Amino acid sequence: MVFIDVNKVKEIIEKDIKEGLIPFFLGLTIGGTGLGATDPITEIVKITKEYNMFVNVDAAWAGTAFYVPELRQELEGLKHVDSIMMNYGKWGMGGMPGAMMFVADRDKLIESMEGKAPKP
């Protein structure tokens, strides 16, 4: 099962731009908690990079599987996202709820918390 239709991503971004909006963020999923669905990360990241968008991957449930080489999916696409969230209280069998966020460029994250616009 897939959440996002790759063929519609560029169409929606272009429509937003024509309406005067600035597309800046896209949230994708690998192993969604409810269904285990996964977005086609590699194909979508190719599109979002054309527009300098920040891409986060929610890997809350299935992200723990990345530690097992045989279970890695969409790894090539993950090399090009801006952040990944993983929750060890789910499939990681963590005793207490907790999430980890991996970021490609921590300066962008820090600047956003300081109310500054990230540098392109």
Image: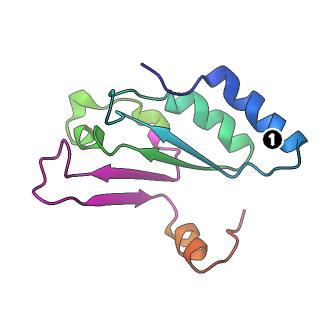
Does residue 44 lie above or below 111 as drawn?
above
User: Which residue type carries mark 1?
Assistant: Asp
Residue that numbered label 1 is attached to: 16
Q: Which residue occupies the foreground of this view, 111 or 68?
A: 111
The secondary element bearing badge 1 is classed as helix
Q: Residue pushed farthest bottom?
A: 114
Q: Residue pushed farthest front?
A: 34
Percent across and percent down for residue 74 are 42, 30
Q: Is residue 79 magenta?
A: yes
What colouring does the structure picture have? rainbow
Q: Quadrant of the C terminus?
A: bottom right
Which image quadrant is residue 70 in?
top left
Does residue 58 lie above or below 94 as drawn?
above
Which image quadrant is residue 96 in?
bottom left
Percent across and percent down for residue 25 are 63, 50
Q: Which residues are magenta?
A: 78-105
Horizontal side of 65 relative to 16 (left or right) equals left
Horizontal side of 71 relative to 108 (left or right) equals left
Q: Which residue: 27% across, 51% down?
A: 87
Q: Is residue 91 magenta?
A: yes
Percent across and percent down for residue 52 are 71, 50
Percent across and percent down for residue 111 are 60, 75
Does residue 36 lie above or below 83 as drawn?
above
